[in-house]
Amino acid sequence: MGSTPDLGPPPRRITVDVAQVRRLIAEQFPEWAGLPVRPVAESGWDNRTFRLGEGMVARLPSAAEYALAVDKEQRWLPVLAPRLPLPVPIPLAKGKPGAGYPFSWSVHRWLDGEPAGAGGISDPVRFALDLAGFLVALRNADAADGPQPGKHNWFRGGTLRTFDPLAERALTALDGEIDVRSARDLWKSALDVPWDGVDRWFHGDVAPGNLLLAGGRLAAVIDFGTCGVGDPSCDLAIAWTLLTADGREAFRERLSADSPEWERGRGWALWKTLVTCARTRGRADDEAVNARRVLAGILALR
C-alpha cells in the first residue's frame, strides 16, 4: 500500500432478533423453516449469530462494513478448507436482504467446541504447536487473486500505521496509569519494521473466541471475516494474548517467524491491548484485568 488507509468512523451496528431470522429463513430457505432458531450466547461483534437446528448457524453482519466479508467467505472458505488441518466454517447458503434486515448474510455448518481460554487448554505447548501448524498450512495456500487488505477486513495484512491513531489515543488516555513511555517506544519501533512484501494468507483475528477447544485440544478455527492475503504478522498477536511462555517459544519456532515478523506481530498485540486497556479504564472485571496482564507481559518481553 502506498499510503496509510483511513479506518473511517465506527460502524453503525444494528440489532437482529430471533423472529427476524425465522422470517428470513422461511422466505429464502423454506426447506429449513421448521428448524429451531436460537441466539448463540457468545455471538461476537461483527455478526449476530444464531443456531439453526443442530447442524447449522446463521451469521448476520451487524453493520454494512462487516457485510463486506460475506462474499469473501462464500468464495474462499470452500477453497481453503480442504487445505487446512482443522475444521473451519463451510458456507452452506447465502442469504439476501429481507424481513427488515438490510445486508447479505450466510448459513454455515456449525462446529462444536468451547472458546479457548487458558483454563481450558490441557497442554499449552501442544495447543501452540497445533495453532502454528494451522497457520502454516493457511500461509501455504495459494495467495494468487486472494483478497487484499481493505475495509472488508479493517486492513489486516497491511501496514501497522493504519492503527497509529488508535494506539496514540489509547496511550494518551492511559497516561499516568501505565508505563506510557515504554509502550510508545515499543509501538514506534514496531511501525518501522519492514515486511518482505510477499503475500500470504492470514486469518486476521486469531483470538480466543475464534479458537474452539474439544477435550482441551484445539479442535476448530472459526470466523474468517477478517481473512485475506498480505502480511500475516497480524496472526501473531495471540502469542502474547493467550499463549504461555513455553507455548510462545514453540509457536514461533513452528512458524519459523523471523525477528521482523515477530516484532510486527508484537505491534499488533500491543495496539489491540492498549485499546482494550483504555476502553476498560476504571473497571475491575475479567476483561480489564486480563488486558492489564497482557500489556504487562508485552512490555516485559522487550
Image (tube, grey):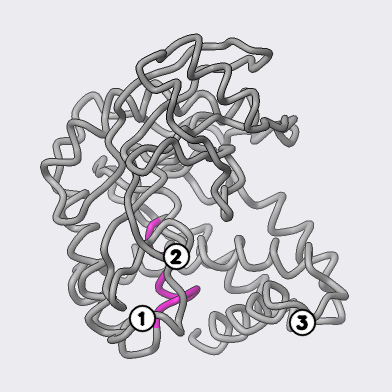
Label 3 and label 2: CA atoms lie apart by 29 Å
Label of residue 121 in the image = 1
Q: Is residue 117 magenta?
A: no
Q: Please, is residue 103 above or below residue 141 in the view?
A: above
Disc 2 marks a residue whose amino acid type is Pro
Q: Is residue 241 magenta?
A: yes
User: As drawn, is 200 to the left or to the right of 225?
Assistant: left
Q: Please, is residue 28 above or below residue 9 in the view?
A: above
The residue lying toward the viewer, choosing from 207 and 14, is 14
Disc 3 marks a residue whose amino acid type is Ile
The residue lying toward the viewer, choosing from 57 and 13, is 57
Lower position in the chain sequence, tag 3 or tag 2: 2
Label 3 and label 1: CA atoms lie apart by 30 Å
Residue at position x 59%, y 10% from top? 98
Q: Please, is residue 32 above or below residue 77 in the view?
A: above
Label of residue 294 in the image = none
* Main SS of residues in magenta: helix
User: As drawn, is 32 to the left or to the right of 199?
Assistant: right
Q: Which residues are magenta?
A: 235-243
The residue lying toward the viewer, choosing from 70 and 231, is 70
* Label 2 environment density (alpha carbons within 10 Å; few <14, some 14–19, many ≥20): some
Residue highlighted by disc 3: 178
Residue highlighted by disc 2: 115
Disc 1 marks a residue whose amino acid type is Ile
